[in-house]
Amino acid sequence: MNARFETICILGLGYIGLPTAAVFASRKLNVVGVDINQHAVDTINRGEIHIVEPDLDIVVQAAVQAGYLRASTAPEPADAFLITVPTPFKEGPGTDHEPDLSYIAAAVKAIAPVLQPGNLVVLESTSPVGATEQVAAWLHEQRPDLSFPQTAAEEADVMVAHCPERVLPGRILQELVQNDRVIGGMTPRCSQAARDLYGLFVQGECVVTNARTAEMCKLTENSYRDVNIAFANELSILCDRLDVNVWELIRLANLHPRVNILQPGPGVGGHCIAVDPWFIVSSAPEHARLIRTGREVNGSKPEWVVQKVLQKVAEHGQDAPRIACYGLAFKPDIDDLRESPAVQIALQIAAAGVGEVWAVEPNIHSLPKRLEGALQLVDFDSALKGADVHVILVDHREFRTQASAFVGRPIVDTRGICDGL
Ligand code: SAJ
């Protein structure tokens, strides 16, 4: 028999939680989204959104107006609880990229008092192997009156599963519905319940495995991409040394039916690909050699770009030049500056003190506090007219469509948007 879900409580209303909440609500489930950020809660309750993601505003507005989506700072009783909070690194001395599960722990603590027999708890946050079992253990500690799968197996009062998100920022709403999902329940009954839940909106296949495999699968997907981008980034550095056009090289190599090289760039950003491979490395450092090297290659690319820019500035030979950095986001057509190599590069150029550093970022209205002072936000036309050196860091649509404007100017093009012009 299919598990019945009428009310869903989603903890963490960020890039994953909010779209997921909105999609469940659009299927006429009662959704309570929970976030510790009062501003996010108020914004959503007005039917607006606090992040940039294509079409999300329309879906959220419709869901709030129809009464199916509501935000709150505290969890409420529900049939299923989804945990979609961040898993950053631990900070402080002696920590080497170890995952920080404190947001998950806080979410567990928040839902424990409202848990009821028959509930399903799904961990969606990207997590190190073993985190779902940890969630179940924490829940048991806080609710000794309820039984959980680690002790009661299929008889448990509360079911627990891992179902990692795999959507691409910029395409979240399509990918949420269309992508296949990996479902890792702590028992087959937990998996079945989670499969029923996601089956309410997922059109792709929901493939069942155990929780540890699901955790490792998510980390593997992002590590695979990281290592492949590292290959492209290494090629770009080699080609620069060997005077070969890397964009043309990759196009040609990819004509081979079994070669598919990704694109080089200024480094790898975001809160996923630049982070998740470390969760594998920190769990077995001596065995994760390739994955660590991929991270190191991508992690050192921004520094290489900075050196290229300083070289270009020196060639230009002007005192106090104005250097325009095009793009601050970690990838095209989004506003997300987290772990962005573009931000790192712009700040390092500013710190080098060779000139004034301008940032052109069409997806934000003002600079975050930590960038104020070091950078100046200017619009595309002013940068094009006024800057002496142009550094393309993100291939935003606005830059791609106007790439010919850069021709003939001193430029460092980390994304190849001017290739062939
Ligand atoms: N990048 C390159 N060259 C490429 C592709 C990407 O330099 O050829 C850079 C981007 O500019 C960006 C970074 O890599 O800085 C990551 O971007 P991305 O588009 O590859 O991935 P994310 O971080 O937006 O989303 C990834 C996705 N994972 C995979 O494709 C395996 C997504 O499906 C996951 O859901 C997401 O991580 C996540 O949340 O884990």
Image: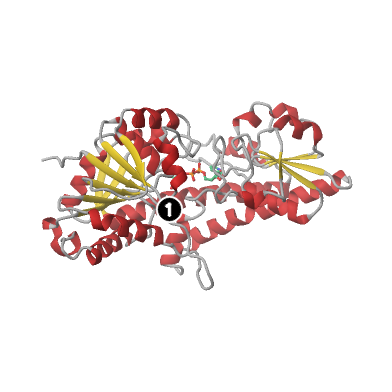
Question: Picture quarter containing residue 25?
Answer: top left
Give the number of callouts: 1
| Whole-percent x, y for residue 191 in the image | 21, 49
Give the SS element for disc 1: loop
Who is closer to the viewer here, 418 or 193?
193
Colour convention: secondary structure
Which residue occupies 43% across, 32% down? 56
Q: Is residue 394 visible?
A: yes
Most extreme residue toward the bottom is 94
Who is closer to the viewer here, 400 or 101?
101
Which residue occupies 36% across, 41% down? 71
Residue linked to disc 1: 86
Who is closer to the viewer here, 212 or 119?
119
Position of 278 compared to 1: left or right? right
Q: Is residue 235 visible?
A: no
How crowded pointer 1 is (Cα within 10 Å; few <14, some 14-19, many 20+) is rated as many
Position of 321 compared to 403: left or right? right
Position of 11 compared to 313: left or right? left
| Whole-percent x, y for residue 304 in the image | 69, 53
**In which quadrant of the rendered image does the C terminus lie?**
top right
| Whole-percent x, y for residue 189 in the image | 16, 50
| Whole-percent x, y for residue 265 in the image | 61, 44
Who is closer to the viewer here, 322 or 376?
376
Which residue occupies 43% across, 40% down? 42
Question: Picture quarter containing residue 276?
Answer: bottom left
Position of 352 compared to 6: left or right? right
Does residue 359 sit above or below 103 in this rendering? above
